[in-house]
Image (tube, grey):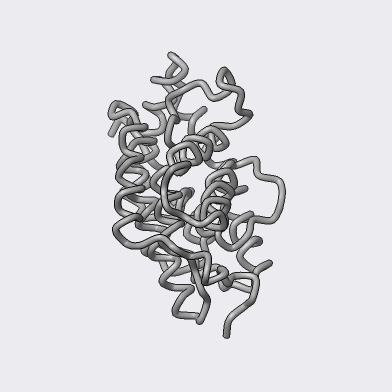
Amino acid sequence: MAFGRFEAPKEFVTLTPEQVFEYSAAAKQHYRADYPYHGWDHALDVISGTEIISTKLEHRGLVIAKGALVVAAAWHDTGYHEDHSVKGFSTKEEYSAHLLDEYLKNKAASEWEKTMMHSAIVATWAGHKTLRTPYELIMHRSDIANIGGPTDEFLQNSLKLLQEQALITGRTPSWEEYVNGAVKFIEFTAAEHDHEALAHYIDPSDTTVDVHNVPFSEAARINIETLLDFDPTA
């Protein structure tokens, strides 16, 4: 059963596997190697997430422009270390989308694909106010996969995010301060995701890439409980 809202206009899906690889690899130079979390490894994780979720939804009879999503995933945090506001962008996501737009100006890709890639990156902003399209939802879900991912990796990534905050701000938050902020973000984002999935008639379990095989909000709850009991000095 296919839902029309998912279907990409097939004649506008033009990227070849070779182009997907080339365009994705070009993003690497826009990441800083010394960022503990938001670096190229995170981009690779998001690429993997988009492929996993897209494949799950393809098996439900849905048509997904997987190649364009992979490229968007590669570029979604480019320029993260730069001051986007100085450059005239209201969010870092808008700046990342701009960097991809500039790269694609002289590249082969349909206008539909370019527009979809841009919107998918912009919609990864945590403050996004409107219902995400299915393509935007896949990208956002892949970006926040760590929240419901394997617990050991989730805890290690929490430490990396704490280190990154210190690198960016010049101030190291206390563990309690970090955890309080993280829990609020996780609870809101996980509930938002399940709501958006259901709004598109998707089983939330079909958009999970974690090992728990449960709706995303439940996987996040498991990790929150572990985070609250975790001792970073142990």
The percent coordinates of residue 168 (x first, y second) are: 44, 20
Which residue is rendered at x = 30% and y = 30% of the image? 233
Of 147 and 176, the residue lying toward us: 147
Q: Furthest residue to the bottom?
A: 1
Q: Is residue 221 visible?
A: no
The percent coordinates of residue 139 (x first, y second) are: 50, 54
Q: Furthest residue to the right?
A: 130
| Residue 26 placement: quadrant | top left
Question: Horizontally, is 233 left or right of 227 in the view?
Answer: left
Which residue is rendered at x = 32% and y = 62% of the image? 17
| Residue 77 placement: quadrant | top left
Which residue is rendered at x = 59% and y = 42% of the image? 126
Question: How many marks overall?
Answer: 0
Q: Is residue 37 visible?
A: yes
Q: Furthest residue to the top?
A: 170
In which quadrant will I find the N terminus? Answer: bottom right
Asked if 150 appears above or below 55 in the picture, the reply is above
Which residue is rendered at x = 61% and y = 23% of the image? 88
Of 208 and 221, the residue lying toward us: 208
Of 169 and 158, the residue lying toward us: 169
Question: Horizontally, is 49 left or right of 200 in the view?
Answer: left
In which quadrant will I find the C terminus? Answer: top left
The percent coordinates of residue 7 (x first, y second) are: 58, 72
The percent coordinates of residue 156 (x first, y second) are: 32, 41
Asked if 197 appears above or below 125 in the picture, the reply is below
Asked if 220 appears above or below 179 in the picture, the reply is below
Asked if 60 appears above or below 217 in the picture, the reply is below
